[in-house]
Image (cartoon, rainbow, N blue to C red):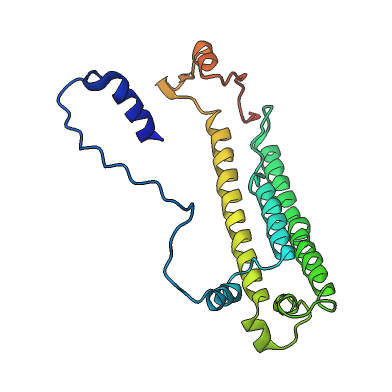
Amino acid sequence: MNKIIFDKHLCAKGNNLITGELQLPEAPAEKLTPYFGMITIPPHNFPKQFSKYCCKTLQIKDEVIRAQQDIRKECNEVAVKDVFNPNVTKTMKVDEFNQIQASSISQASYFLKETWVNKIKEIIKASFTASQDTKASTTGAGASAATWFNLNETNREAYEQGKLKKFLTQTKFIMQDTLLDMTRGSVKRYVDSVLDFLPLTVNVKNPNQVQNMYYTAEEIKRMGAEKVKFPLFRIDL
């Protein structure tokens, strides 16, 4: 896209496009338009290669693809949640602040352990149970695909070679990445919310005179982040 825009302006303005000496390479010769709209590939054994691909990939059943989509949707919703509470709307005591953060952490932990994990389990069970229900009325490749994701598999060797283990491993990695993204984002928002209360500079003139410098009202308005300033903690003396 950048080359198309550059060539357009170069053709329109020529050497006046850029001031100074600039040596452009010669334009490549135009290739002949192929007669057929397809790419030529060397001869190969397509059934054998396609069979290898089916043995390696997970996306061979509609139920698997739908399960991956639903799991990704749940993980995307979790990734934007907060572990800490960055929404401080009033001045409070330190104990009250700690209690609010502890409550937020407890709620997030309960949601992850009880709600989120159970939703992932329900998605996997519902998707692969539907796949097993079609196994009895399917023969050939369809029956083999259903066997690869058999939730009732009791043979350890069959489980190790099947696709269910790969799918569960993939799901575990996705959930781990989601927790990492959620934690990083939550910590950043929490830190930013606390830093918002800190002054830009602190000028200590004497023990009885300390001056905190904040953004002015005009600067805050220009930044588009207008917010009423108030102390974060209240200390009783």
Q: Which quadrant, please, contains the C terminus? A: top right
Name above or below for residue 64 compared with residue 14. below
Percent of width and height locating residue 147: 73, 79
Q: Is residue 136 left or right of residue 185?
A: right
Name above or below for residue 152 compared with residue 73. below
Percent of width and height locating residue 143: 75, 78
**Which residue is at a point 75% across and 66% down the rendered structure image?**
124
Percent of width and height locating residue 59: 64, 65
User: To which quarter of the image does residue 202 belong?
Assistant: top left
**Which residue is at a point 16% across and 22% down the rendered structure image?**
20
User: To which quarter of the image does residue 60 belong?
Assistant: bottom right
**Which residue is at a point 77% across and 59% down the rendered structure image?**
119
**Which residue is at a point 65% across and 37% down the rendered structure image?**
94
Percent of width and height locating residue 132: 81, 74
In this view, the residue in front, 125 or 61, is 61
* Residue located farthest toward the left when viewing the structure as drawn: 21
In this view, the residue in front, 132 or 137, is 137
Name above or below for residue 136 compared with residue 93. below
In this view, the residue in front, 192 or 52, is 52
Name above or below for residue 94 compared with residue 110. above
